[in-house]
Image (cartoon, rainbow, N blue to C red):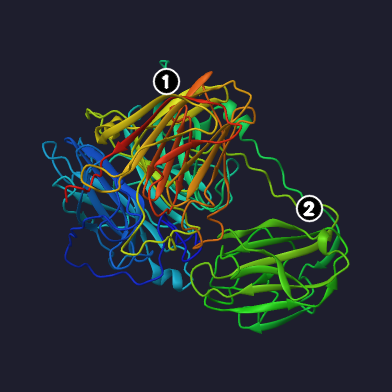
Amino acid sequence: MKTMLGLIISSALVGCSMNHTSPLTESPAYQVEAKRNEAFRPQVHFSPAEKWMNDPNGMFYLDGEYHLFFQHNPDASVWGPMHWGHAVSKDLVHWEEQPIALYPDELGTIFSGSAVVDWNNSSGFGTKENPPIVALYTYHNAEMEKQGVINFQTQALAYSLDKGKTWKKYSGNPVIENPGIKDFRDPKVMWHEPSKKWVMVLAQKDHIGFYSSDNLIDWSLESTFGEEVGSHGGVWECPELLLMPVEGTNQSRYVLLVSISPGGPNGGSATQYFVGDFDGSNFVLDSEWQSELAPIPAQFPTGTVFDDFESGADKWSSKGDAFATAPTAGGHPSQPSPTGFSGTSLVNSFAEEDRATGTLTSEAFTIVERFINFKIGGGNHPDKVGIQLVVEGNVVKSETGLNRETLHYASWDVSQWQGKSAFLRIIDKETEGWGHTYIDDIVFAKAPALNRIEPAIWLDHGTDNYAGVTFFNSPESEENRHIFMGWMSNWLYANDVPTEKWRSAMTLPRSLQLVETDEGLRVRSQLVEEVDSLVEASIEASTLASGETISLSAVDKANRESALRYAFEVQGKATSPVSIRLENENGEYVDIEIDQQQSTVLLGRSNSGETAFNKQFSDKQKGALTTTGDVFNVTVVIDRSSLELFIDDGTTVMTSLIFPETVYNTMRVRPNSQSLHQISIERLSSVWSSR
């Protein structure tokens, strides 16, 4: 499902994937044996033996086995032509990697999707005695995309009669044609018992489409949701609709998960969710959520218009071919038409294809007003695509797009350079997906331009839990939990993290529950109890005061450096925050602060280990604290390259990548912190150590 290369790339290519190479022919299945003991290799999380992995796909439970499929490039450790990798587990923690399940073909590469156990054989592909596993997934046709065709993503079907070991693609693919939407992907299917039909949720640009079917083959569009609610800071992806009981009541609500990239609360990728009702055709937000998520309108103040591009580009000099015809009357013939600009013309660097590059440099001007406001759209490639402000020969401000064809407002506070001479430079240095920019209405003003404020509720406030979905359970299944796994990375730096043989891991499996809090209904994420089976050693303390520490070696019985699980309790009504540092002997550490008075959680990883691969990686992460009692617990799982923080049984969650030399084996209570109570550290044995 995705998009990006190097920094964060395409939304179109993001289909919970991404792509700009030709589909590969099918090759023999492979299976790689690996010790999985390289630097930064997680020891209690699933990661592929080698090469690239992103979104979880096609997850289902059947006959005591959990099947995890995932976006996979078997040929490189960076994003590439997408396949479906496959792994199986009997306990959710020990995984056996299987041969590749789905390969690209003449219709495209294999983006994200889902799989269901068709226990009633509604599709007719199997029998009631041997029900088929039916996978619905997105085809991404890179050749069509390169030709400028919009409908390069379609939905397709494959089925398995041997519990997911081998797959046959449906001869009538695609089962859902593209209606003319550039980002059209990531089908997730559920059974809707009241209407006795299958329901599919599908990401469609920046909203969700609901489809229904009696047989998993013939699909009808029922409705759409989300155009006017939720965060739209990026493309919507990897949705899922879940019917969840409200804990402690006899009521149930529907929860709609929607991943978005960029636009997350701490930059890049994240997952928002909505709570409401679904009748088999329409999803309607609960009234409390309608109020809580009501958007605040945008503002674009009047001022001195530097250029609106309605009368040409006389103030600008052009180099290269990207801006040779600037300004442009809307879109070029071979691209989706941009929206959100005013008048008839704007700067558009597409120039018939994303491969065009160049610069457009303005005449000099003196900065008089405090703000420079403008509209910008197109690709999200910092320092490669967008607009820059140059003062005294230095680039002092820059802005890029959001991988969207719709322009949004941007504003620079330039008060510190008032009275100085400056010029603007519009750039396009990117030749791959989303390698274009849109600029319009550059205005010097006394007040900043403000985009529409779009409140959102986030499943995980950390930077590194994306595109997560749950395992499908048939109505006859003995497994009735909503077990969730997400991709532990972020499109801001996914291709650049400091691993080589392999890239990316999944979160630990989590059970999702819907609970009532002071803030309203919220989704709680709790580690599944199967993780407890990995505990091999522990140390405890009743109290830790400010300045005190507790430590436990991370080296397990197989002599591998594995993972640690820290846990403690705190007073929810305390006036001082909880402030801890998780550290190792090499001077590397992560700081966590939980402030009940401000209802915030802060996570700092600027000194966590390797961080130089991305300039935004060190930014402090901030989350909203939601708790349900006067005393609450905190759990932190530290693996070789990840941190998962659960507060109040997972009512607040933050997941974050880290790359230290060694696992943080000490917890320090920082100065001015309130005391911790009922402290423990548990060592979790490596799930790979038997190999």
The residue positioned 58% from the left and 47% from the top of the image is 620
Residue annotated with mark 2: 448
Is 408 left, or right, of 685 in this rendering? right
Give percent across and percent down for residue 663: 38, 47
Give percent across and percent down for residue 49: 25, 57
Q: Nearer the viewer, residue 582 or 42?
A: 582
Is 298 left, or right, of 97 in this rendering? right
Q: Earlier in the sequence, mark 2 or mark 1?
A: 1
Residue annotated with mark 1: 247
Q: Nearer the viewer, residue 639 or 187?
A: 639
10 Å neighbourhood of mark 1: few (<14), some, or many (≥20)?
A: few
Give percent across and percent down for residue 41: 32, 54
Q: Nearer the viewer, residue 269 or 590?
A: 590
Q: Is residue 114 visible?
A: no
**Cα distance between the residues tagged 2 and 1:** 44 Å
Q: Quadrant of residue 402?
A: bottom right
